[in-house]
Amino acid sequence: MRIEAGARTDLGRVRKNNEDSFEVVSEIGLFILSDGMGGEAHGEVASKLTVDTISQHCREALNDPKMPMFEDQEAPELTAKTNRLGSAIRLSNRVIYESAQKHPAQRGMGATVVAVWVDGERVSMAHVGDSRAYRLRQGSLEQLTQDHSLVAEQVRRGILTQQQADQSEMQSVLIRALGIDPSVQVDVDEHTLIAGDALLLCSDGLSRMVTDAEIASTLMTSQTAQEAVDRLVESANDAGGEDNVTVVVLRVGSGSSGLFARLWRWLNGPATA
Ligand code: CA
């Protein structure tokens, strides 16, 4: 699978600090997005700790596959990479928590995270909080993550309708986030990619400002992943830009260029330079 990626973070039109962070580690197929919270710029600290810790833990595990999983949690039905992603996120939770314990000014800081790790046609996915992953497949957009927010939980329980949730003033209240407790439960999942799929990771600064229909049409009508990212960030800002906005888009190619290259070499024989 050939992956083409684009990413961008933007302050938006209202906030004074950008508390979102992202990291694209293309060479190992790892993409991480985090939305921090906490006063006095500590949200920035939390989201940066999140992406740095996850990236480092995953890289180290590639060099040392026997490295223990953090908190010894491992699900036998999941791949090593999915388990590792869960381990990395649990570790980032502890790092934020301990930093806030050590520095009283950081008390209350936290972060969301959504991350994907692509391995051939398999993709490991994990999240905590209300940063989202979507998949566009054959023209239809599907949200692959369930928000750990109070209103999303109330919709799941039938207490609120989706429309009430979308208008609620409680939208930003999370029921799960990194850095609040010494341990956190991470939602992990695995998907199979097919050529033509697009994956999108975003902070709530996109998903609250731009409709799913507009996200889908932008993904479908952009020539490149980066163009889709730039247009979506602009749409969020045009709609008011009330929050920091971060978008990562992966487009899954057919890998046909590799096939043509192999065919060309086969037709032209091994002696060609
Ligand atoms: Ca946000």
Image (spheres, grey):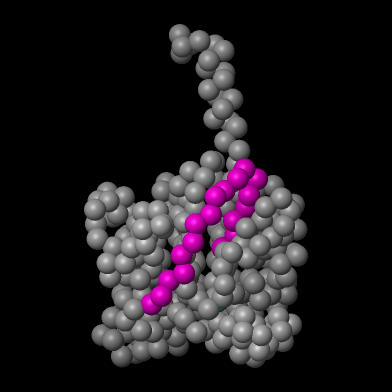
Residue at the far front: name it: 77
**From which residue to which does the magenta span run?**
184-201
Q: Is residue 122 above or below residue 204?
A: above
Q: Is residue 240 left or right of residue 258?
A: right
Q: Where in the figure is residue 147, as x and y percent of width and height?
A: 56, 75
Q: Nearer the viewer, residue 94 or 235?
A: 94
Q: Is residue 45 left or right of residue 128?
A: left
User: Visible in this render: residue 21?
Assistant: no
Q: Is residue 22 left or right of residue 13?
A: left
Q: Where in the figure is residue 244, as x and y percent of width and height?
A: 57, 75
Q: Is residue 268 above or below residue 18?
A: above
Quadrant assignment, res 52 = bottom left
Residue at 28%, 81% (x, y): give it.
98
Q: Is residue 192 magenta?
A: yes
User: Visible in this render: residue 266?
Assistant: yes
Q: Nearer the viewer, residue 72 or 59?
A: 72
Residue at 54%, 30% (x, y): give it.
258
Q: Nearer the viewer, residue 216 or 227?
A: 216
Residue at 42%, 46% (x, y): give it.
27
Q: Is residue 21 magenta?
A: no
Q: Is residue 231 above or below residue 118?
A: below
Quadrant assignment, res 142 = bottom right
Q: Nearer the viewer, residue 263 or 23?
A: 263
Q: Where in the figure is residue 173, as x and y percent of width and height?
A: 55, 87
Q: Where in the figure is residue 186, as x and y percent of width and height?
A: 43, 71
How many marks can you see? 0
Residue at 52%, 17% (x, y): give it.
265
